[in-house]
């Protein structure tokens, strides 16, 4: 029989998280994925003897302790009984950053982070410490607001004052309150590409949550690649009675009597009173469901939402000794301290700065002995090229040229190379224009005004980076958890974990 309690459309980490929690709660769950493997942007792929990650480099929330007392990913894996099957390797420092005449590690722990940057900018120590303290306060208040299910603004302003005060602020605006050295502001914000926006546009609230995730919770790489993480979630779903079907593209979400009734995969119908869309928001609303089923104001809101840029990735295997060259797991290389200029170059389709990930420094088993993997990443809009097939080689060359400026003799030591364009991201995930982060996390598009997990259509829910709270592996894991809470009628995260652990 093709009848289930809940159907999940898409197997990104948000969808898998939601499915896993619901299966653990005893619901009959079906996950339908169009691709030949689960994971969404967390999927991995093998070329020759090299194991690459599609797009994820680091994740937080994997440890048993942390400032939120939570660690959602850790709890999720423990609840499913698959936690012991994965090894998360700590990446400290979580990033290295390079500018003209400046280089620094960005270490984990609040004290180490402040001390490291204060050595370069001693006159800014107090302001920097206060700014980091504010970031920590904001993220603690996010957890408190979620736990208390705050809806009344007067109560919220009393219990989570920083969250209320800065919810409309950009990262640049808040940095300016605490730091009066523009270069330090740029260095502090170096990891902005993780969220796809420069400090002048990026929500301070979401930035603070991301930074504290890596700094206070810890940053981790999944041994063997993040495909192992997705596969472990699938295993947990199946162990608790759920079903995961690959190569099963959903063509329609069925609405009957203003209520979700199921989905269609080619000519096969699967029935369920609840569907969770872990898919592109526009595709879900306009193609899979149909906008006539949504209130006009809801459709207007979606049409006004601003989507994120995409990325271009170059995957390389090299026989260079990257340990000897003092490479790091994750680094950003900028030719200018001005991130507005850097982002303007991105929007114009010019590659002027890149991120470089070397996962084999933490996990040598991803490549044969004596070789390393390099993942070179540049943000780019899908719309800057009419034909990515024609433009692909030129962008690969440009990105490798920049990497070669920092890695001597790189071009002479490339054993394998492959590129992925914004069109590649769109093809594998169907995200609108290959959007890497769903909706942009600008102040007017974060909670409480971001698209919620529960839709206006009865029985239809959302999980992933197109809805609350936002992008990143940790963000979409929270999204899947929130969707599960809605479906199970559980208001507080603590009550969810109490019921499942």
Image: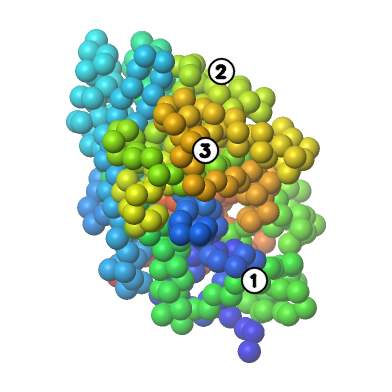
Q: Quadrant of the C terminus?
A: bottom left
- What is the CA distance from the residue labelled 1 to the residue labelled 3? 28 Å
Circle 2 — which element? helix
In this picture, residue 214 sits left or right of residue 291: left
Mark seen at residue 247: 1
Q: Quadrant of residue 157?
A: top left
Q: Position of residue 187 (x, y in %)?
A: 38, 22
Q: Nearer the viewer, residue 427 or 238?
A: 427
Q: Are marks 3 and 2 in contact (CB under 8 Å)?
A: no
Residue at point 25%, 29% (across, down): 113
Q: Quadrant of residue 275?
A: bottom right
Q: Residues within 10 Å of mark 3 (few under 14, many from 20)?
A: many
Circle 1 — which element? loop
Q: Nearer the viewer, residue 444 or 95?
A: 95
Q: Are marks 2 and 1 in contact (CB under 8 Å)?
A: no
- What is the CA distance from the residue labelled 2 to the residue labelled 1? 42 Å
Which circle's residue, 1 or 3, is located before the other in the chain?
1
Q: Residue furthest bottom?
A: 1
Instruction: Say which residue label 2 marks.
Output: 341
Q: Residue furthest front?
A: 412
Point out the frontmost of discs 1 and 3: 3
Instruction: Say which residue label 3 marks.
Output: 377
Q: Is residue 433 above or below residue 191?
A: below
In this picture, residue 298 sits left or right of residue 137: right
């Amino acid at each position: 029989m093709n009848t289930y309690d809940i159907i999940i459309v898409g197997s990104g980490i948000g969808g898998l998280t939601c499915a896993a929690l619901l299966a653990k709660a005893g619901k009959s769950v079906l996950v339908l994925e169009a691709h030949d493997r689960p994971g969404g942007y967390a999927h991995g792929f093998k070329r020759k003897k090299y194991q690459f990650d599609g797009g994820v480099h680091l994740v937080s929330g994997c440890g048993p302790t942390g400032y939120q007392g939570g660690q959602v990913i850790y709890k999720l894996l423990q609840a499913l009984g698959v936690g012991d099957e994965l090894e998360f390797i700590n990446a400290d420092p979580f990033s290295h950053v390079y500018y003209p005449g400046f280089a620094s590690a960005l270490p984990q722990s609040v004290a180490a982070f402040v001390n490291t940057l204060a050595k370069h900018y001693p006159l800014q120590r107090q302001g920097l410490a206060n700014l980091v303290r504010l970031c920590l306060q904001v993220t603690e208040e996010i957890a408190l607001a979620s736990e208390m299910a705050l809806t009344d603004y007067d109560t919220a302003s009393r219990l989570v004052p920083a969250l209320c005060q800065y919810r409309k602020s950009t990262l640049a605006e808040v940095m300016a309150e605490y730091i009066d050295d523009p270069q330090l502001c740029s260095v502090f914000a170096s990891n902005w590409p993780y969220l796809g926006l420069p400090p002048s546009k990026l929500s301070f609230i979401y930035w603070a949550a991301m930074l504290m995730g890596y700094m206070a919770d810890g940053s981790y790489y999944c041994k063997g690649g993040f495909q192992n993480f997705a596969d472990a979630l699938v295993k947990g779903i199946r162990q608790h009675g759920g079903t995961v079907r690959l190569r099963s593209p959903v063509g329609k979400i069925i609405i009957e009597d203003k209520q979700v009734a199921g989905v269609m995969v080619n000519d096969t119908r699967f029935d369920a009173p609840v569907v969770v869309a872990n898919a592109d928001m526009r595709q879900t609303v306009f193609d899979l469901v149909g906008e006539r089923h949504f209130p006009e104001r809801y459709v207007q809101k979606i049409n006004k939402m601003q989507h994120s840029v995409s990325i271009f990735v170059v995957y390389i295997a090299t026989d260079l000794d990257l340990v000897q060259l003092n490479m790091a797991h994750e680094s950003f290389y900028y030719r200018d301290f001005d991130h507005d200029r850097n982002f303007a170059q991105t929007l114009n389709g010019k590659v002027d700065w890149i991120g470089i990930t070397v996962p084999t420094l933490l996990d040598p088993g991803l490549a044969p002995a004596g070789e390393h993997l390099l993942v070179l990443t540049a943000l780019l809009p899908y719309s800057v090229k009419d034909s990515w097939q024609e433009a692909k080689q030129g962008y690969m060359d440009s990105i490798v040229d920049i990497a070669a400026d920092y890695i001597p003799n790189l071009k002479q030591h490339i054993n394998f190379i492959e590129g992925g364009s914004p069109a590649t991201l769109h093809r594998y995930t169907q995200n609108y224009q290959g959007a890497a982060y769903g909706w942009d996390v600008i102040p007017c598009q974060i909670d409480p005004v971001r698209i919620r997990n529960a839709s206006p259509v009865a029985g239809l829910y959302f999980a992933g980076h197109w809805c609350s709270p936002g992008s990143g592996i940790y963000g979409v894991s929270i999204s899947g958890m929130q969707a599960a809470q809605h479906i199970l009628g559980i208001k507080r995260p603590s009550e969810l974990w109490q019921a499942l652990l």
